[in-house]
Image (spheres, grey):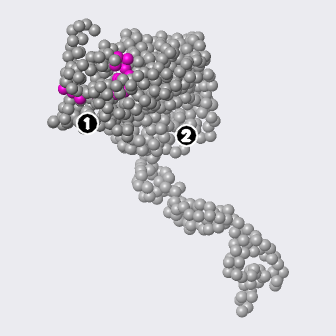
């Protein structure tokens, strides 16, 4: 640091000591350059009778680190720092404020700064980027009488510097990445997939190393099969692998990924590699993500309605366009996603999505080691994903599947009535949705056939020719790419936004249509019962086919089985409601016993119904046949 810059930094420090209330947090107290800062700051604090304020909660945090058997050096440093703070408190240049009941130090700072900015200039010294942003954001709250709030960090010279997050993002080993494309490879890498043992897997509150410098792992955000995601004191989050997942191949692949500038909002692509204190590879740094998993938010219709209650078909189409643009960006750089998995796409809105688990992408000769059956092309079904490189044709099948499942939320293209397991259905390419006169008559029951009928002609044609065995786009080298799908979906979105698509049938704009798309050559009526539109030739007496099969539900008087008195029986056939189910009706007419008539000696049958009737009335069973009973009655 040259003399001019040092004098300027010293003058600013002097001004803060004179006119500001100065607070400091735990991460700055533990900073390697804290001793140098105190050497510069303490003389000015004494000169202006000011004090460095340390929340009691920070002392507690230091004491929590002291008995750290997993990180002895950190424990020793925390003890030395705590003792120094207490000694400075005794000497009158540090003031320890707060109560034992205070929660996290970050919350204490936010509460105190919000309250006392009406009386004082307030400065927080912190290394925590997120806390600094929160503190500086207090300046945005409107108050005429408020004093300024500042957040600064300890720099390597022992002075205070502002936070410049854009500098952080552009610094480090990989700041001059090549902006070109990755190579297309046909031969698999020979880098080992054997687990590499490491001495320590970092966890919460541990400091780790990156090519940009040391960072602190904050609270755990999520955990999965490969590792754990942590917040950090940077704008990024950290993925720390489990010990059994750390391999040389992972490290070499990440190093390759970082040789190119992959900058697309919403794609959580690695920005740096993370090492533990022993300089062993343990994970990587990436942008944070937000939103709900596509699998849950979109692919389960009841949750879709709950999560996005105002959505129409155009919102799903716009979401498809948003996702396609990101896939196209990756494919244009020769990055193959491979595992196009709805669990790895997070949805905030139809215009904002995040792609996660990007370290699994196929980069040059490093394969995507994972996959799911529904998104795996027929030609690679059953293969071990770690043992080969996917082609762009394989990728295009997965893209088509994802798009189909967006248009028919959550329904795989090869789901069908009486179908085999998903893998076998995909291998056969036996697609069940009709196009023109072509159909295998296996379209799944439910609303799916309605949704299919309301898609645009060009989209149905593209899906049919992709998923049908002899289709125009069925073969690996012929499938539509992301940019070609974009043309079709942008066209669809334009038709919906201009209202042209709804001119023929307004229901085509609905997320979940309740009937087939209207045919302009067919007359429609409004059903008397459900008030929905229905094809006249399939209706009777003004009642649609669906309502004719519905009706009053009640129970059989004998066995309690549920029966339905259909609207067809009630309004069309005008029959009476049966008391018994067919089985019980037949049983009632069966013979209970055969009796010989006491008059004519002829045999006659007493049915189960007759037996039940006589028993219910407390009567004996008849001894004469019906004819003899009538004759006896007439004689009287």
Q: Position of residue 555 (x, y in %)?
A: 59, 64
Give the residue displayed 44% in from the left and 14% down from the top.
258
Picture quadrant of residue 144: top left
Q: Mark yes or no: residue 266 visible.
A: no
Residue most extreme to the top? 2
Residue 443, disc: 2
Label count reads: 2
Q: Position of residue 470 (x, y in %)?
A: 56, 26
> Quadrant of the image for the N terminus?
top left
If you read the primary sequence from the N terminus, does the residue marked by circle 1 or circle 2 appear first? 1
**Mark 2 burial class by Cα count in 10 Å: few <14, some 14-19, many 20+:** many
Give the residue displayed 65% in from the left and 67% down from the top.
558
Q: Which residue is mark 1?
A: 114
Q: Nearer the viewer, residue 527 or 143?
A: 143
Q: Which residues are magenta?
A: 19-34
Q: Mark yes or no: residue 554 visible.
A: yes
> Quadrant of the image for the C terminus?
bottom right
Q: Position of residue 550 (x, y in %)?
A: 52, 57
Q: Is residue 111 magenta?
A: no
Compared with 522, 578 (above or below) is: below
**Mark 1 burial class by Cα count in 10 Å: few <14, some 14-19, many 20+:** some
Q: Is residue 32 magenta?
A: yes
Give the residue displayed 69% in from the left and 69% down from the top.
588
Query: Relative to 410, is 494 on the left or the right?
Result: left
**Label 2: which secondary element:** loop
Q: Nearer the viewer, residue 27 or 218?
A: 27
**Label 1: which secondary element:** helix
Depth check, mark 1 against mark 2: the one in front is 1
Q: Nearer the viewer, residue 379 or 176?
A: 176
Residue 208, disc: none
Q: Position of residue 594 (x, y in %)?
A: 80, 74
Query: Relative to 300, is 321 on the left or the right?
Result: left
């Amino acid at each position: 640091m040259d003399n001019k810059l040092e004098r300027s930094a010293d003058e600013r420090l002097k001004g803060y000591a004179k006119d500001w209330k100065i607070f400091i947090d735990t991460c700055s107290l533990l900073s390697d350059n804290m001793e140098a800062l105190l050497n510069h700051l303490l003389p000015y604090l004494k000169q202006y009778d000011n004090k460095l304020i340390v929340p009691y909660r920070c002392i507690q945090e230091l004491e929590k680190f002291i008995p750290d058997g997993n990180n002895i050096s950190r424990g020793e440093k925390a003890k030395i720092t705590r003792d120094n703070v207490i000694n400075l408190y005794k000497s009158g240049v540090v003031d320890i404020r707060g109560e034992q009941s205070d929660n996290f130090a970050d919350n204490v700072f936010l509460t105190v700064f919000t309250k006392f900015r009406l009386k004082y200039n307030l400065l927080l010294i912190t290394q925590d980027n997120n806390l600094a942003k929160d503190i500086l954001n207090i300046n945005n709250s409107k108050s005429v009488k408020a004093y300024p709030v500042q957040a600064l960090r300890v720099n390597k010279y022992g002075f205070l510097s502002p936070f410049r997050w854009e500098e952080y993002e552009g610094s480090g080993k990989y700041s001059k990445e090549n902006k070109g494309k990755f190579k297309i490879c046909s031969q698999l890498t020979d880098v080992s997939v054997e687990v590499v043992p490491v001495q320590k897997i970092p966890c919460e509150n541990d400091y780790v190393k990156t090519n940009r410098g040391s960072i602190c792992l904050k609270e755990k955000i999520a955990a999965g099969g490969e590792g754990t995601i942590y917040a950090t004191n940077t704008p990024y989050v950290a993925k720390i692998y489990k010990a059994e997942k750390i391999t040389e191949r992972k490290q070499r692949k990440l190093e390759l990924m970082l040789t190119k500038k992959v900058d697309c909002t919403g794609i959580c692509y690695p920005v740096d590699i993370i090492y533990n204190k022993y300089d062993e590879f343990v994970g990587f740094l990436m942008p944070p993500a937000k939103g709900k998993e596509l699998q849950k938010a979109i692919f389960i219709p009841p949750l879709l309605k709950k999560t996005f209650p105002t959505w129409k078909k155009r919102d799903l189409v716009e979401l498809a366009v948003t996702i396609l643009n990101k896939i196209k960006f990756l494919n244009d750089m020769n990055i193959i996603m491979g595992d196009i998995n709805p669990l790895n796409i997070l949805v905030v809105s139809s215009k904002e999505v995040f792609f996660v688990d990007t370290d699994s992408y196929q980069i040059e000769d490093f394969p995507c080691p994972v996959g799911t059956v529904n998104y795996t092309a027929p030609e690679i079904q059953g293969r071990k994903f770690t043992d080969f490189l996917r082609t762009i044709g394989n990728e295009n099948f997965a893209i088509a599947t994802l798009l189909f499942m967006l248009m028919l939320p959550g329904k795989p293209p090869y789901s069908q009535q009486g179908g085999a397991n998903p893998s076998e259905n995909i291998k056969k390419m036996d697609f069940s949705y009709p196009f023109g006169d072509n159909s295998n008559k296996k379209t799944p029951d439910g609303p799916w056939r309605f949704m299919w009928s309301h898609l645009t002609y060009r989209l149905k044609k593209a899906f049919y020719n992709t998923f049908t065995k002899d289709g125009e786009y069925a073969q690996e080298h012929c499938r539509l790419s992301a940019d070609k799908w974009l043309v079709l979906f942008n066209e669809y979105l334009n038709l919906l936004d201009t209202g042209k698509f709804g001119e023929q049938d307004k229901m085509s704009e609905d997320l979940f249509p309740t009937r087939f798309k209207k045919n302009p050559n067919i007359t429609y009526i409004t059903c008397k019962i459900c008030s929905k539109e229905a094809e006249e030739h399939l209706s009777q007496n003004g009642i649609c086919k669906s309502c004719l099969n519905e009706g009053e539900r009640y129970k059989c008087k004998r066995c309690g089985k549920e029966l339905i008195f259909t609207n067809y029986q009630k309004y069309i056939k005008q029959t009476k409601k049966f008391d018994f189910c067919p089985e019980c009706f037949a049983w009632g007419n069966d013979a209970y016993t055969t009796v010989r008539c006491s008059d004519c000696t002829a045999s006659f049958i007493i049915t189960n119904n007759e037996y039940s009737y006589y028993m219910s009335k407390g009567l004996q069973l008849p001894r004469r046949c019906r004819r003899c009973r009538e004759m006896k009655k007439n004689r009287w």
